[in-house]
Image (cartoon, rainbow, N blue to C red):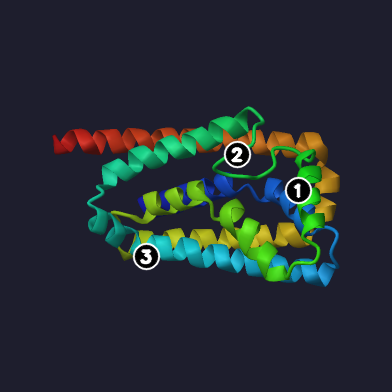
């Protein structure tokens, strides 16, 4: 397997772990589950489109932001690695991260249900943009992951990162549209197992980011 394919798989798995489409499906149903299916589909498409645009922008302008604020790539890798590890660690122990809000189990659906019911009179755009697009789908952890994978690389790395996230958005859209069937089939224990597995993967990816950042910083000394 070439380095290109290894990088592509790593990027995709990083996004998959931090976005956790199955767990986010329970959140989505909690926010919009009481709406007609056509309305839910509209909300899902809009939320994922907004999240994709935000992440793509961070991938493209990430390097310029570093230069503007004098941030080095090793510093981003270290900070991003710590952030991703913390989110993964909390998910691994079945906790909801304050930085990233996917439900660790189906029981969290009820909490989001209350929020959805309170906002029944609001427009679809409000739910799609906040809290779905921000911070659930494109939260700090997702943005840090995107910038870590794309920054410091050329056009190829940026393209791979954006394409990987686009594919994940399509997978997430499918999960949202088939949300009720997926949640009923997996159950509370199934969603918890998936969340903890994704947490483990995120913790490992965060550790690798941190190690790479420290190694790069040591070379600069």
- Pinpoint residue 98: horizontal percent, then vertical percent: 57, 39
Tell me where residue 65 sits by quadrant.
bottom left
Q: Is residue 130 left or right of residue 34?
A: left
- Pinpoint residue 199: horizontal percent, then vertical percent: 58, 35
SS at badge 1: helix
Tell me where residue 196 sits by quadrant.
top right
Q: Which mark is residue 112?
A: 1
Say which label, 2 or 3, has the lower sequence index.
3
SS at badge 2: helix
Tell me where residue 137 sits by quadrant.
bottom right
Q: Judge whether residue 195 can be spotted in this image.
A: yes
Crowding at mark 3 (Cα within 10 Å: few <14, some 14-19, many 20+): some
**Residue found 54% across the figure and 55% down from its top:** 138
Where 61 sits versus 135, above or below?
Answer: below
- Distance of label 2 from label 3 (alpha carbons): 26 Å
**Residue found 64% across the figure and 56% down from its top:** 131
**Residue found 49% across the figure and 48% down from its top:** 140
Q: Is residue 61 left or right of residue 131?
A: left
**Residue found 63% across the figure and 47% down from its top:** 20
SS at badge 3: helix
Instruction: Tell me whether the residue at label 3 lies in contact with that at label 1, contact meaning CB atoms closer than 8 angstroms.
Output: no
Q: Judge whether residue 2 can be spotted in this image.
A: no
Say which label, 3 or 1, has the lower sequence index.
3
* Disc 2 target residue: 198
* Disc 3 target residue: 60
- Distance of label 2 from label 1 (alpha carbons): 21 Å
């Amino acid at each position: 397997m070439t380095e290109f394919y290894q990088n592509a798989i790593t990027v995709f798995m990083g996004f998959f772990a931090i976005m956790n489409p199955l767990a986010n499906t329970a959140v989505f149903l909690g926010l919009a589950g009481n709406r007609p299916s056509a309305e839910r589909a509209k909300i899902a498409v809009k939320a994922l489109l907004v999240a994709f645009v935000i992440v793509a922008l961070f991938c493209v302008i990430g390097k310029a932001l570093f230069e503007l604020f004098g941030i080095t790539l090793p510093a981003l890798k270290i900070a991003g690695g710590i952030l991703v590890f913390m989110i993964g660690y909390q998910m691994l122990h079945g906790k909801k991260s304050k930085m990233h809000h996917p439900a660790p189990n189906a029981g969290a659906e009820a909490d989001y249900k209350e929020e959805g019911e309170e906002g029944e009179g609001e427009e679809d755009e409000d739910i799609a943009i906040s809290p779905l697009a921000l911070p659930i789908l494109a939260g700090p952890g997702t943005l840090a992951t995107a910038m870590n994978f794309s920054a410091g690389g050329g056009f190829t790395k940026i393209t791979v990162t954006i394409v990987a996230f686009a594919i994940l958005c399509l997978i997430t859209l499918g999960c949202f549209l088939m949300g009720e069937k997926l949640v009923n089939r997996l159950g509370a224990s199934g969603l918890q197992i998936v969340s903890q597995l994704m947490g483990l993967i995120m913790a490992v990816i965060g550790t690798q980011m941190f190690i790479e950042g420290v190694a790069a910083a040591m070379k600069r000394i």
